Amino acid sequence: MSGLTIARRQAVWAWIFLALPLAYFSLVRFWPALDAFSLSLSKWNLVGPRRYVGLANYERMAADPVFWQVLANTFEYLLLGLPVSLALSFLVAYHLDRVQTGHGLLRALYFLPHLTTATALAWVWRWFYQPAPVGLFNNWLSVFGIAQQPFLRSTFQALPAILVPAIWAALGFQIVIFLAGLKAIPRSYYEAAEIDGAGSPQILREITLPLLLPSFVFLLITTSIGLLRIFDLVYNMTAGGDGGPLNATKPLVLSIYQSAFARMDMGYASAQTVVLFVILLLLSLLQMRLLRARP
Amino acid sequence: MRRLYQGLTRAALALTLLAGAAVRAQAVEIEYWQYTFKQRVETIDELIKQFQKANPDITVKHVNVPYDNYRTRIAAAIPAGEGPDVVQLFYGWLTDYIDAKLLQPLPAASFDTAAIDRDFFPFVQGMKVGGQYYALPTAVRSLALFWNRKVFKDAGLDPAKPPTTLAELVDIARKTTKRDAAGNLLTAGIALDTAGQDVQWIRQVLIPEFGGTPYSADGKKVTYNTPSGVAAVQWYADLIAKEKVSELGFLTDGVTAFRSGRAAMTIDGSFRLGAFDGQKGLDYGVTELPSHDGRQSNFASYWANGITAKAKGEKLAAAAKFLAFITTPAAMQLWMEKVGELPARVALAQTDAVKTHPTYGAFVRGLAYSVATDFVDESSQRKVMMDMMDRIIIKQTPVAEAVGIAAKEEQVILDTRK
Amino acid sequence: MKPLRPGRIVAFTLLLMGGIVMIMPLLFMLATSLKTSSEVYELHLLPREPTLDNYLEILTRSPFGRWFLVSFSVASLTTASVLFFDSLIGYTLAKFRFRGRTFVFIAIMSTLMIPTEMLVIPWYVMAKSLGWLDTLWGVMFPGMMSGFGVFLMRQFFLGVPDELLDAARMDGLNEFQIFWQVALPLVTPALSALAIFAFLGNWTAFLWPLIVTSSPSLYTVPVGLASLSGEFQTDWEMIMTGSSIATIPTLLVFILLQRNIISGIMLTGLKG
């Protein structure tokens, strides 16, 4: 009897605590989002009337070669950026974890770029990619007698060239997460393994990596979301903020931005946002599965 | 959701009306929007001060928005019934704005169509739709060739003699281009940048000078996919591929290349004067665009002031009054002195003092034979040209083929016009 | 002390070199901000005649101090709100049993997947109807609570033992007091991590502050920086200077609080 009252009391308190937040989330997140969904089924240039057009925006998207290229670019950012940045940050974290002298200083050096805004640093990277004698990278290449590279002026190299600062800026955060994971592994595990005569590679394979799985999963998801929503760097590193040359670097969010705010094509922009939403949703479902599979 | 907003808006409106009744006798407030640019902001502030002095019953609120985000801000403001009563818009956007029923025609009572036809530069008639003007500029701009005297001197050329023809331009560019032993570009003969003004230069200047026409007279058809159009594009592409006097993306953009003294020449508009003047150690001159085969052309552009559909009643009257005020000869004179853009009224621009002015002169003389492209979608049409050059330079697509692709792409954009 | 093995020295040297490469772009930014306008376009890192002219110019040409104050107020106020509400929601979802709990949790989590770009126009329409345009509150309201914070705080509150809360109930504390006096102090590390994320996120936010403000006196630092570039024109030395000014405080805070910040983020990684 008294248990029931406690349960009831709890429910009342819970809803009191949640009342304001739920009102907030409904008004500031859900209604606008639903509005965007309904917008994806309309034609609207922001000023005239909104006209319902059914799936016309989606049909147009499917028939637009630029949209498919944009989608391919978006996944290229993800599929190139994810393994490289995770491998790199793990490598640094793994060795940094074993360094005692100057540990704090080194960690700070790797973390600092994470605190800056992409916009400002995009310019610096643009300069680095210039042809020699101005561009830093091409200068290095010429020192080693390697041919000059076009970097941002190439349809093939531009996307990876933009990915480098993206990885650079996120690296510090990833390293810190890995360091946390590494620190959480009890020393005794290593000591036991050493007594058993296991070598470094074996310890890495059989103890470190499996126990680091949660950190990997966490970074996998956060990094993927970050890469799928890449925008600032592309906008600031390509001529005219256009995602060129020849759309070679244009990601989905830039395409949404251009449809909405350069061409005022809100319906088409919303339809692309829905696609982005679906991709992110699928990714989250994948995350849930991975988390459930975790030992 | 929208119903809720409408309800709320109505409630807010009712409150405003109640409050408004009390202060009815006081000033009408109108809002004026333009993009942030130091000299423009200061000049409009000055004009507002004068205007309010003459019209104590009107106050003008001046809002300026960073250039890169100007359209975004307007786009967000309008559906909310918010934003300017008088708005400064790029002339190429007019179609969008009228299609969207954002602008209303300038009241015939205060703006005489025949007088505007007569007094303003002919290309301003682009603001006339169905016999009615929708917007008027204070100032207009054209393109010119900027040259760096010091680079000319260093190359052993006469710093007082810029090129007057395309052939001379190539010749000077060859002589002023400097490369290091490894062949890296140190100084460009001419700074080229398709994300800058080169798109307009190719489309409205080079193509006509090579004997072509970019668009049909009614603006509905792309007409540059012809041997002369191809020849014009070929000439531009040759500057990079054959003459090797420039590279696209050299020093990130054309302005930076010229500003830093690493380019002998560049094509740009009068709005650039401010940036170059602020650069220490940059000694430059401005001259008319070079001609070819005796033909000369130029591209004019302008920002025009329109009255938005939201202005009604006394606000509309106040907006019309303000718009008329900022397009008076006196306002134009002030604008030229402060901002460096040319008066939109022919009589003011074509005085000897202006025509022989060391910097404005070249632009004003160019205005006389300028054309303003009748854009359907300026940013998409610019992108077609940028992509065309990228195809030629990066993908080594033959020029004729690249021009064909561009013409087809741009025709699709033109066809979207109702 | 263990003797230094050559492997360790090699690893240390490589790590140090990597670290220097990491901060090269930052040094480049700082160096550029100290260069004269004629020197900006030369690649050597160190300015030949270092000058603070760019800083003086930015401070006289624009109300940078004011923008700074706005950014700081917006970031601190939203951070405070996020900390309070997200922990309250997280606590409720972790520690109360009631019908609809899972639904509420999933609903709030799903907001994580909605890109901001999608919400900006409806927000604007809303801000307009409610008279929030061009106000500090208008800049702040979309960031008052965050799904990520709820998720993070819920994870941490799950680890708080129920017995502790029950004991507090026995002592006659009401539910809010239990949350505020008993549960919250147990998750301070999580709060500090969340504070960092919320603060940085609001400090660098661009698109929404840009759209909602129209008076320069209400610009945040990123919007103010953007207003320094004009039509087809960018004063790069000014942008580098502005960015340096914007970055220096975060760097200082980081250096001062390095230990707390890093350990906060470490915790996030472990609990996430």
Image (cartoon, coloured by chain):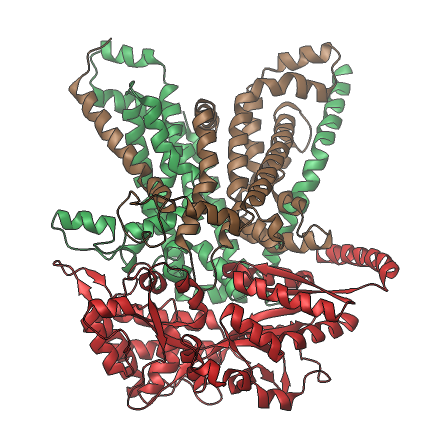
Q: Residue farthest to the front?
A: B353
Q: Quick check: can you spot residue B246?
A: no
Q: Residue at x 24, y 53 (%)?
A: A134
- Chain A shade: green
- Chain C shade: brown
Q: Is residue A201 left or right of residue B340?
A: left
Identify which residue, A127 or C50, lies in the foreground.
C50
Q: Position of residue A249 (x, y in %)?
A: 36, 57
Q: Position of residue B124 (x, y in %)?
A: 54, 83
Work out whether B313 lies above or below C198. Answer: below
Identify which residue, B361 or C159, lies in the foreground.
B361
Q: Which of the image's four quarters has the C terminus of chain A?
A: top left
Q: Is residue A61 left or right of residue B251?
A: right
Q: Residue at x 85, y 60 (%)?
A: B23
Identify which residue, C245 or C163, lies in the foreground.
C245
- Chain letter, colour red in render: B
Work out whether B60 lies above or below B164. Answer: above
